Image (tube, rainbow, N blue to C red):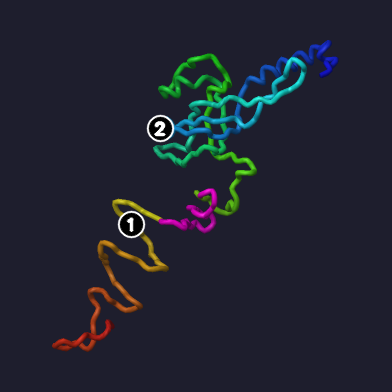
Amino acid sequence: MAISNNERAPDLLTTIRDAINAALSGLWVSIPCIVENYDPEAVTVTAQPTIQLQVGQPDGSIILVDLPLLQDVPVMFPRGGGCTMTFPIKPGDECLVVFASRCIDGWWQSGGIQPPMENRKHDLSDSFAWFGPQSQPNKINNISTSTAQLRSDDGQAYIELDPASHAVNVKTPGVFTVEAGQNVFKGPVSFENSVTMASGLQVDGQLQNNGKDVGSTHLHPGVQSGNSDTGQPK
C-alpha cells in the first residue's frame, strides 16, 4: 500500500490528531455483545463483542480481528427498593455491555465504597451487561403503542397496563396460576366460562342461580309430607 504524504512528512496537526485517535482506541464506553454463557448463581455472563477491530499490518493492509470474550460480566437487572425484575438469560441473547471509568473489582467483590484495585480506566475488564438492545434480525414484533407490557418475545403471553383506561389485562394460551395465602377481590367478579371448586364454597350474602335465590333464605313451593319432591326455588 502506498504511503501518503502525511505519513512521509506529517504536520503538527496530523500528529496530534493521530495521537488522540490512538488514545481513544483504548478507551471503551459500550459495545453490543452476544451471550456465550450465563451463571445464575454469580449473576454474570460471558459475552462476545459483536464489533470487530481493524488492525493495521506492516504492509499497510487492514485485517479484522474479533475482540476477546468478556468474562464475569455482572448482569444488571432492574432493581430498587427491595424489588427486582428478573428474566431468563440464554446463550445467543443480545445485550449492551458498558464499561466503567475505573476498576470495579473491589466494589464487585465487597460492595460499599472501595478504592480501585488497579489504575485502569474504561477497560474491557470493568463491564456491566444490560439486556434490551436488539439487532434487526432479532427484533420483536407487534409492540403495543398504547400500553405498557411485560410480554414474551412472541407476544403470545403478556401482562398489560393501559394508561388511558387504567385497565390491567393478562393474556396467556397457557395456565394462569395464583398461589397466595389468601386472595381478596374487592370488586364484582365475572366468569365467562365454567368454574371448578376443589375445596368447597362459602358464600356470605345472597346466592343466585339463573336469577333465583338458592341461598339459605330461599323457599320451595308445593312442600308436603311424604316422599314427594319439592318445587323449584322461588
In the image, residue 153 sits, relative to residue 72, either above or below, namely below
Q: CA distance from mark 1 to mark 2?
A: 35 Å
Circle 2 — which element? Answer: loop
Q: Main secondary structure of the magenta part?
A: loop
**Residue type marked 2:** Glu
Circle 1 — which element? Answer: loop
Q: Nearer the viewer, residue 111 or 72?
A: 72
Residue 166 drawn at (x, y percent): 49, 56
Question: Tag on residue 41?
Answer: 2
Which of labels 1 and 2 is toward the front? 2
Q: Nearer the viewer, residue 112 or 191?
A: 191
User: Which residue carries the number 1 mark?
Assistant: 184
- Name the residue rendered at 23%, 87% in the picture: 221
- Name the residue rendered at 54%, 48% in the picture: 153
**Residue type marked 1:** Val
Magenta stretch?
A: 152-175
Mark 1 and mark 2 lie on one chain; the one further toward the N terminus is 2
